[in-house]
Amino acid sequence: MTLSAQDRAKRIKIILFDVDGVLTDGKIWIIPVPVVSPDGTTTNKMIEAKGYSAHDGAGVTLARLGGMKLGVITKRISETVAMRSRDLKLEFVYQGQAFKMQAVREIMKKEGVTLDEIAYMGDDVIDLPVMRACGFAVAVANARAQVKAEAHYVTPSRGGEGAGRDAIEFILEAKGVLEQCIAASIDESNPLPAAIDIGKGGDLK
């Protein structure tokens, strides 16, 4: 029996994202910053910058209100990923992962979940092993054709432009709790939403 995307989404307990091209638009800005050493010589330190969507941050709040845990698995190693992950208080942060199923298996062991209970969102062929194995595979609107072909759901938005939010809302809608989570996210008496996306660039722990 072939399950619909909605049926697959209903079972999800953990949502995992690639970063570049999914939570960002895929552009990586390398900025040279002059550094003066004690002997007076000047060298350039390279700073990496990425842009993230505030809509995805709000989506993380909704997902957590819906009882889910979230994380990122990325091949690159970047302080911007660490900072954004701290902002959003993501439960799982795996950088430097050339083979992403290794991280997925570790998460499964830690959390006691099955592959059917994991959603993964990607945009390029490095994401295919996880997408092929997990319960709910999501591709961004501008993913590579091979990735879209194997996704259970393709978001209407492009990577870095709210695609993560699209996936989260699809899952919450399938579970029948989207409107409930939205109401909780704007409820002044609920302290959770303000604590999740603090927006301080990772300065606050």
Image: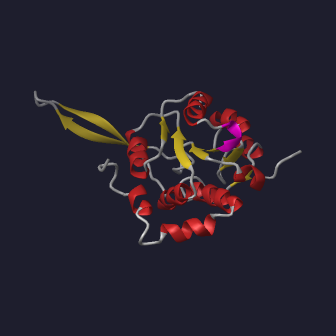
Q: Where is residue 188 drawn, in percent x and y?
A: 42, 72
Q: Residue at x 34, y 48 (%)?
A: 202
Which is nearer the eye, 16 or 75?
A: 16
Q: Main secondary structure of the magenta part?
A: helix
Q: Residue at x 68, y 32 (%)?
A: 129
Q: Residue at x 38, y 45 (%)?
A: 83
Q: Quadrant of residue 164?
A: bottom right
* Residue 94 visible within the image: yes
Residue 58 relative to residue 141: left or right: left
Query: Where's the N terminus, which quadrant?
Result: top right
Farthest residue toward the left? 39
* Residue 49 visible within the image: no
Which residues make up the magenta segment?
A: 114-118
Residue 116 relative to residue 93: left or right: right
Does the magenta-highlighted stretch encompass residue 74? no
Task: Please determine whether, in this image, residue 154 is positioned above or below residue 77.
Answer: below
Residue 193 relative to residue 68: left or right: left
Q: Where is residue 106 drawn, in percent x and y?
A: 56, 29
Task: Please determine whether, in this image, residue 122 is positioned above or below residue 180.
Answer: above
Q: Where is residue 25 drawn, in percent x and y?
A: 53, 51
Which is nearer the eye, 27 or 22?
A: 22
Q: Across the whole image, how many numbered discs are drawn on residues?
A: 0
Farthest residue toward the right? 1
